[in-house]
Amino acid sequence: MIYNMYIFDRHCQCIYYHDWHRGHTAKNAFDQHGDPLASHASASGGGGGSTTTTTTMTDPRQGMNMSLEEEGKLVYGVVYSLRNLVKKLGKGQQDGFIAYRTSHYKLHYYETLTGLKFVLNSDPGVESLQQALRQIYTQLYVELVIKNPLANAGSNGASVNPETMGAEGFRNGVDRFVRSLTMFDTL
Amino acid sequence: MIFSIYIINKAGGLVYNKDYSDGLSKLTSNEYLVLAGTFHGVHAITSKISPVPGSSGIEMLETDTFRIHCFQTLTGTKFLLVTDPQQPSVDHTMKKIYEVYSDYCVKNPFQNPEMPIRSEQFDVHLLKLVKSVGGLVVTNTTSNAYNVIGGVSGGPLLGHNQSSPPTVSNVASPGLA
């Protein structure tokens, strides 16, 4: 089961968020709020700024009273700390960690040489998805965002934001790719 | 192979650390303290950022060259076990470590659970356990392990330098050979 995915740029900014099965197992908790697992794949990602994304995303996670923006920061903090911890502890060349697992989910991590961080959450039984993240980077992000002159425009060369500039293709591509994974909705 | 064992108290302080082989880089005692504190914080956050409600904190961290397994007791003490990625039946080993801890630290009336562990019996039995699950390369084990004992019993809080040569006091532990 794949839950959600984040992409962070070098500046700790969450530049992409997508979720699939969020709140699925927590169905009961959400039932009372009327709007249980409304498929919020949010293909309406044109908005741009993180404020708009926040408002569209808060619904399915009412039980957790944390905005997406806030959560993004925490996720970034966690992967950043763990990455440093692993680099310090490991001998020689060590490019961060592969994944970590808790009782309820597993977080997969892939970092590009340019400092882009790809984070994917799945259920804990899934084996490593780092290769899948790598594929998302090489086949989708590079092709549809980096090579897209519109996606780069207006970002001062500092960060590429697929949400803002004509990168609808990227969101659709990621959606299609993740849905094609065998573990997408098997628990 | 077991690389190291760390024990973190419920406040995030490092109360015990020991290396059993040289699969990890050596850090200063201060760095170990920072590392323990970082892990403690991350452990708390990981249960908050779960995509599904009710998750525990981080249980296993996987990298190319090692894995960190974390077991948290009901009282909040965390046991970190750093192994190589192929180490089998870590859960069992973790239980055994907890048993050793219960026997020689919890039952020790002079041991405050929040303070660094300085119990020779604990050292001895932990070493025996690690050996039994194939944690040790028998060559150059002794010097390695004793070095670290020296560092820890000097107390990370005292800023003892771990790379100092073993002195008589930390080599003389009967029953270890």
Image (cartoon, rainbow, N blue to C red):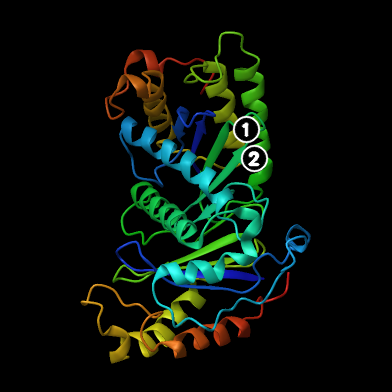
Residue A64 in the image, given as x and y percentages of width and height: 61, 54
Point 67% across, 34% down: residue: B96
For label 1, the SS is: helix
Residue B159 in the image, given as x and y percentages of width and height: 29, 23
Point 68% across, 50% down: residue: B54
Q: Which residue is mark 1?
A: B97
Residue A168 lies, with reference to residue A111, above or below; the image says: below
Q: Which mark is residue B93?
A: 2
Q: Closer to the camera, A88 or B89?
A: A88
Point 42% across, 24% down: residue: B149
Cα–Cα gap, marks 2 and 1: 6 Å
Q: Are marks 2 and 1 in contact (CB under 8 Å)?
A: yes
The residue type indicated by label 2 comes to Thr
Is residue A101 something that shows in the picture? yes
Residue B171 in the image, given as x and y percentages of width and height: 39, 18
Marks 2 & 1 on one chain:
yes
The residue furthest top is B110
Quadrant hosting residue B18:
top left
Point 49% across, 39% down: residue: B40
